[in-house]
Amino acid sequence: MKKYTLEVCVDSVESAIEAAKGGAHRLELCSNLVIGGTTPDQALFEKVREAADIRIHVLIRPRYGDFLYTENEFGIIARNVELYRHLGADGVVVGCLLPDGSLDTERLKVLRELAGPMHMTLHRAFDMCRDPYEALEQGKALGIQTILTSGQRGNCMEGRELIAGLVKECGREMEIMAGGGVDAEVIRQMIPATGAASYHMSGKVVVDSPMAYRRAEVSMGLPGLGEYEIFRTSREKVRAARRILEQI
């Protein structure tokens, strides 16, 4: 019987608790999920560890945007990998590219060594790389255990053909984890279409802030997104996705 994995991306203690109660196998912990996620701070990691008895993989991404990093930015990435190894994270989620769109294998090799026994996931920098099959082989050689991908498309359903090809090529050496638009129905369709056994979702819903007093003339939020809209993981969405995996 194939072993399936459901990973839920969260950026708050509240979301982590809901994901765990919904049946997630592990968490990807980040901050600022609304902009694709950045590195969480130590206090958030520690509070999530206290609140949820579940594996935690930590996203290491110093800023929003592309994955071509300066020396200073890479220094921050490296220090955070070391920090979360010492704090007892179960894994780290990383990625670096070169200007030509290929993986920065030299920097990833450094991060693999710094991570020690921690699980390592190559995040969706993979979806921005020039040659996915070359990157897959490079990832194997580096000892990366998981690649998170939408199949180099806007969501994993659109990228399912590439995901199916990657699943065939990776064999038992690596986990291909489908992400981007994942919910219970997507998983139901993706399993027969791709053979992928691992899925990454946020399961988010928008929760209205309990703030009673609101000054309409001033906005601190992103354009098009008010500061009174809070993204949280839905236990029900996670539970529905887990139920599909249990039925396979």
Image: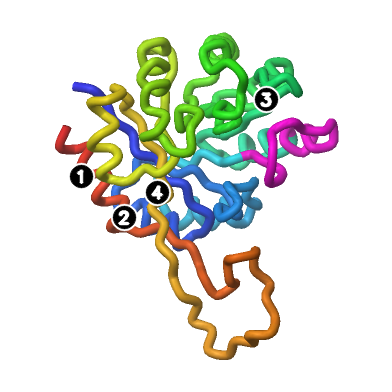
Q: In the shown orientation, is residue 169 left or right of residue 23?
A: right
Q: Amino acid at mark 4?
A: Asp
Which marked residue is nearer to the observer: mark 3 or mark 4? Answer: 3
Tags 1 and 3 touching, CB below 8 Å: no
Residue at horizontal 26 percent and vertical 51 percent from the top? 239
Q: Is residue 119 above or below residue 38?
A: above
- How many residues crowd mark 2 within 10 Å: few (<14), some (14–19), many (20+)? some
The residue where tag 2 is placed is 21
Q: Is residue 175 above or below residue 32?
A: above
The residue where tag 3 is placed is 111
Residue at horizontal 25 percent and vertical 44 percent from the top? 185
> In the rendered image, which quarter contains the N terminus?
top left
Secondary element at tag 4 = loop
The residue where tag 1 is placed is 243
Find the distance from the CA under tag 1 to the CA under tag 2. 13 Å
Tags 3 and 4 touching, CB below 8 Å: no
Secondary element at tag 3 = helix
Q: Earlier in the sequence, mark 3 or mark 4?
A: 4
Secondary element at tag 2 = helix
Q: Earlier in the sequence, mark 4 or mark 2?
A: 2
Q: Earlier in the sequence, mark 2 or mark 3?
A: 2
> In the rendered image, which quarter contains the C terminus?
top left
Image location of residue 92, percent across then percent down: 57, 34
Q: Quadrant of residue 21?
A: bottom left
Q: Is residue 187 magenta?
A: no
Q: Quadrant of residue 156?
A: top left
- How many residues crowd mark 3 within 10 Å: few (<14), some (14–19), many (20+)? many
The residue where tag 4 is placed is 53
Q: Amino acid at mark 1?
A: Arg
Residue at horizontal 54 percent and vertical 20 percent from the top? 144
Residue span colored magenta: 60-78
Which marked residue is nearer to the observer: mark 4 or mark 2? Answer: 2
